[in-house]
Image: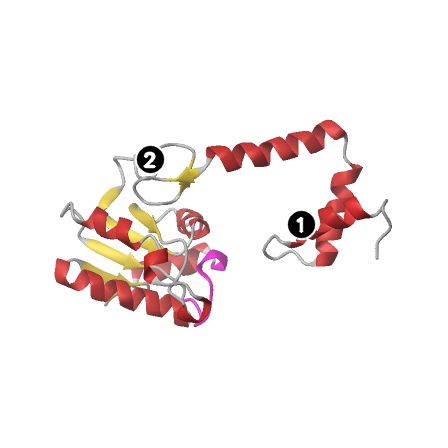
Amino acid sequence: MADSNALPMVLLAEQFAKLPGIGMKSAQRLAYYLISRPEEEVQAFADAMMHAKKAIHYCSCCQNLTDQAICPICSDDTRDHGIICVVEAPKDVAAFERTNEYHGVYHVLHGLISPLTGVMPEQLKIRELLARLQSGTVREVIMATNPTVEGDATAMYLAQLLKPMQIKVSRLAFGLPVGGVVEYADEVTLYKALENRSEM
């Protein structure tokens, strides 16, 4: 059991360890680094986190994260609003934007259908996607979920939902390996996957 002097450091490390991709050793390094910084720097770090938490919310159109009512991508008139790229998470939007080759808009599901972990369709932003499609201006929906069991199941589920709407539904031509993750793909691979997408 940690002594009372070490306890705050242990608690801080445990909080860092809750972040994705951070093990306990990395969490301890982060905790020690933070403690070594001047108090005003630590306060600025804490303030930035709280400000982001309070200011950032879902875009009322695409469900991506933004600090505005409608995100900059959705409000950009130069983008092709007739093509919607459906992704699992906001980080996937960032990955596609790095290609500088996709000029449509996005829809963020905030998860994938996974009955084994209790994630059902009604827990995702599917209703919001269907509402966007009622305008009749969307020509194509690109399913850009990861090539995993859950990603494929989600893409197939959405394709079946959209079939009666007479909207073209395509799937990325994954030059990505099966089981790969969009977020970690390089720009060229993502661009080729977009370019060679196939209709579902």
Q: Amino acid at mark 2?
A: Ile
Q: Name the mark nearer the viewer: 1 or 2.
A: 1
- Residue 180 on image: x %, y %: 46, 67
- Give the number of the disc on residue 16: 1
Q: Is residue 36 magenta?
A: no
Q: Which mark is residue 70?
A: 2
Inspect this view and state whether residue 102 appears. Answer: no
Nearest the camera: 113 or 170? 113
**Residue at image point 36% right, 35% down:** 72
Image vertical order of residue 46 relative to residue 163, above or below? above
Q: Which residues are magenta?
A: 174-185
Magenta run includes residue 182: yes
Residue at the image point whose x is 47% and y is 59% from the top: 185
Alpha-carbon span between mark 1 and mark 2: 31 Å
Magenta portion: prevailing SS class:
loop
Indicate the position of residue 183 as horizontal and vertical percent values.
47, 56
Label 2: few (<14), some (14–19) or many (≥20) C-alpha neighbours in 10 Å: some
Asked which secondary structure carries label 1, the reply is helix
Q: In the image, is 14 to the left or to the right of 139?
A: right
Crowding at label 1, few (<14), some or many (≥20) Cα neighbours within 10 Å?
many
Residue 62 has which mark? none
In screen coordinates, is 87 left or right of 169? right
Give residue 83's position: percent from left, percent from top: 24, 50
Q: Tell whether label 2 touches label 1 (CB within 8 Å).
A: no
* Residue 74 percent location from the top left of the image: 30, 39
On-image quarter of the N terminus = bottom right
Question: Considering only order in the chain, which callout, 2 or 1, is on the residue closer to the N terminus?
Answer: 1
Quarter occupied by residue 44: top right
